[in-house]
Image (cartoon, rainbow, N blue to C red):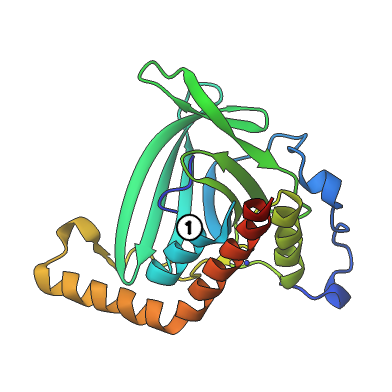
Amino acid sequence: MKTLWVAVVLSFVSVGQPAPLTCDKLAKPVEKRPDLPGRWHYIAVSTEVCLPALLINNMFWPSLAVDVTYKGTPHHYAATVKAKMHGFCVNETEDFFQNNNKLFEVNSENSPVGEPDVLLQTSCSDCIVLKSNDTLSTVSLLSRRTTVTEEELKEFEMQVQCLDFSKPQILNADQDYENCQVIDDITEDQSGTFLLRVFERVRSTHQSILKCLVDMLLSYIPVIIT
């Protein structure tokens, strides 16, 4: 269930909610295997350096969800990822194998292969946090809800800091995947409209891209000097 591309009740109303986890716990895998079948909404995504997630969010501002279904064989599931970008949608399905807190891709014989995604701890009762070491290393917050509370989002922000990842990008909360056009059927005129929307999005958010580039450059200066 790799990320393709590829989140708040205030503290005074949190009575009865579990206390936020500490940094040492947030960096550890879950101990109890979560119940995965059903729909999960991507709330926020972080990458090791700020630029990849920032570019994806600032160009396409995607909505992402994944529908997990049981395959009928123990620990085997299918994940259908739904993405919506500027009114156009794309779906992609892949199978995976769950072994406790690890999610593996499977080969043609349904055997687990490669380096797994890892489910990390969270105090959010209907959320999962997924750490992926694929081509693009990511940490993603997913929830049964389309949005999460400020407290839950702040915990995730602390979690990615614990893992030395960049500030998370909050994804689009528009989860209507029925009323949008499949991007494979896009016409030439619609392609122009799509690119115009990308340009307008980048123009309105370019300052954050510049800040990310400056921060990345400054982070390399000590290494260059030494």
On the image, the x and y values in percent for residue 106 come to 44, 24
Q: Which residue lies at the image location 17% right of the left edge and 74% below the top edge?
A: 192
Which residue is outermost to the front? 225
Q: Which residue lies at the image location 34% right of the left edge and 82% below the top edge?
A: 200
Instruction: Answer with the quarter of the image where residue 20 lies.
Output: bottom right
Q: Is residue 201 left or right of residue 28?
A: left
Residue that mark 1 sits on: 52
Residue 166 visible, this angle:
no
The secondary element bearing badge 1 is classed as: helix
On the image, the x and y values in percent for residue 191 come to 18, 69
On the image, the x and y values in percent for residue 175 come to 45, 66
Instruction: Answer with the quarter of the image where residue 100 lies.
Output: top right
Q: Count the numbered circles shown.
A: 1
Taking 137 as reference, is 75 above or below it?
above
Taking 112 as reference, is 8 above or below it?
below
Q: Is residue 225 left or right of residue 47?
A: right
Q: Is residue 135 left or right of residue 24?
A: left
Nearest the eye: 77 or 133: 133
Nearest the eye: 148 or 222: 222
Nearest the eye: 98 or 200: 200
Taking 90 as reference, is 10 above or below it?
below
Q: Which residue lies at the image location 83% right of the left edge and 45% below the top edge?
A: 25
On the image, the x and y values in percent for residue 73 come to 49, 21
Residue 152 visible, this angle:
yes
Q: Say what amino acid the circle numbered 1 marks.
A: Pro
Q: Which residue lies at the image location 89% right of the left edge and 68% below the top edge?
A: 15
Which residue is outermost to the left? 188
Nearest the eye: 45 or 143: 45
Task: Decide: few, some or many residues near mark 1? Use Cα within 10 Å; few <14, some 14-19, many ≥20.
Answer: some
